[in-house]
Structures are given as structure tokens and as C-alpha cells.
Image (cartoon, rainbow, N blue to C red):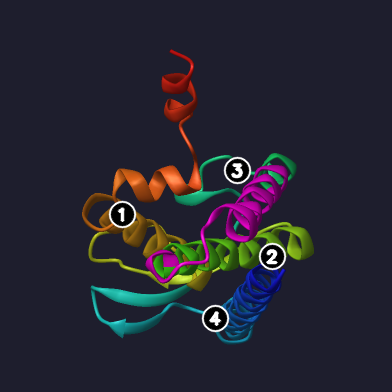
Amino acid sequence: MERNNTQQHHLFKKTAIGAVISALLIGFDQLTKYWAIIGLKDKPAFVIWDGVFELRYLENRGASFGILQNQKWPLVIFTLIVLVVLIYFFIKKIPNERRFFFLNIIIVLICAGAAGNLIDRLAKDYVVDFFYFCLIDFPIFNIADIYVVIASFLLIVLGLFYYKDEDWEKIIPSGKKLQNNNF
């Protein structure tokens, strides 16, 4: 009984911390988008480094790299599904062990990024983007996008060099043990 209470306490603490960090990240994303609207909309680009990097206002009515333009509801539904799945994994599947700290951070970052852009999509029918690397003509992006990219990069690196098969097995059991026991 004591162990169950301790596990519930740790789960509550992890969930509360994750929610607070997500809220702070989303708040920062929304604040920067507000600043972009106030300072950049209907104005020429603000050059940070000539020929390399500038702040340029864009109303993105699609997804990454401009795909799915004017497809608001499929993007909203997809984002909601992703958020529900990630929150489920965060709460129910990721073991409450120190080893999985980074995986929890990855989920919080992706959720914050997805939620930040979802808020824009629902409130404005577009996502506010404003960072532009003109040197390589990279698509214009925002803070929420940065959260998702950082999380994706971390997931790839940690998946290749840190987490082992047995770690992934704790999260998503493959059923091999069950199959082997049947023979």
C-alpha cells in the first residue's frame, strides 16, 4: 500500500511538473508570437544579420514547409490525436525512473510545441511564424517549431546512443515474452 501511494505521488508530481513546464513553454511561444504580430506584421523584415537571419512575419495556414495549406481541421484533428497519445504515454507508459527523464522532457517539448501552434490555428486560423534564415532560404518558423525540432533531435540522438532495447521494452512491450512462454 505504501509503495502504491509513493508511485501515485511520483506520478502526480511528474504530471504536475510536466503541465507547469508545458504551460510556461506555451506561454513563451504565445508571447513571442504576440510580439511578432505587434512588431512585424505589415512591416518590412527586421534584419538581425544581413543576408543570414531576419525576423519576418508570416501567417502560415498550413503545416511544416507550407504543406496542407488551408487544411485547418485535418491539422487540428491530427494535432489533438498526437497530443492525446503523447499525454497518455507521458502519464501511463513512461516509467517513473531517472533514466527516462530525457524522454519525459522530449514529450513535454513536443506537447508544448504542438499546443502552441494549435492555439494559433484555432484562434486565428493560421500559425504565426517569424524566424527566417534567408541565407539558406529555410521556411519561416516560430518558437513552437523550435521545441518540436529540439525534441525530435534529442529523441533521435538518445534513441541511437542512450536508450537500449530493454528501455523501449519497458514503454512498449513487444509481446516476445508472451510468445516465448507459449512454446
User: Between tags 1 and 2, which lies in front?
Assistant: 1
Disc 3 to disc 2, C-alpha distance: 15 Å
Identify the residue shown where x is 67% and y is 58%: 126
User: Where residue 124 sits in the image (x, y, percent)?
Assistant: 75, 64
Query: Does residue 35 appear to the left or right of 142 in the view shown?
Result: right
User: Between tags 3 and 1, which lies in front?
Assistant: 1
Disc 3 to disc 4, C-alpha distance: 22 Å
The residue that label 1 is drawn on is 163
SS for callout 3: loop
Q: Which mark is residue 120?
A: 2
* Highlighted range, magenta: 76-100
Above or below, 158 relative to 171: below
Query: Does residue 139 appear to the left or right of 122 in the view shown?
Result: left
User: Between tags 3 and 2, which lies in front?
Assistant: 2
User: Between tags 4 and 2, which lies in front?
Assistant: 2
What type is the residue that disc 2 sits on?
Answer: Asp
Quadrant of the image occupied by residue 28: bottom right
Above or below, 44 relative to 118: below
Above or below, 108 relative to 21: above
Q: Which mark is residue 40?
A: 4
Quadrant of the image occupied by residue 38: bottom right
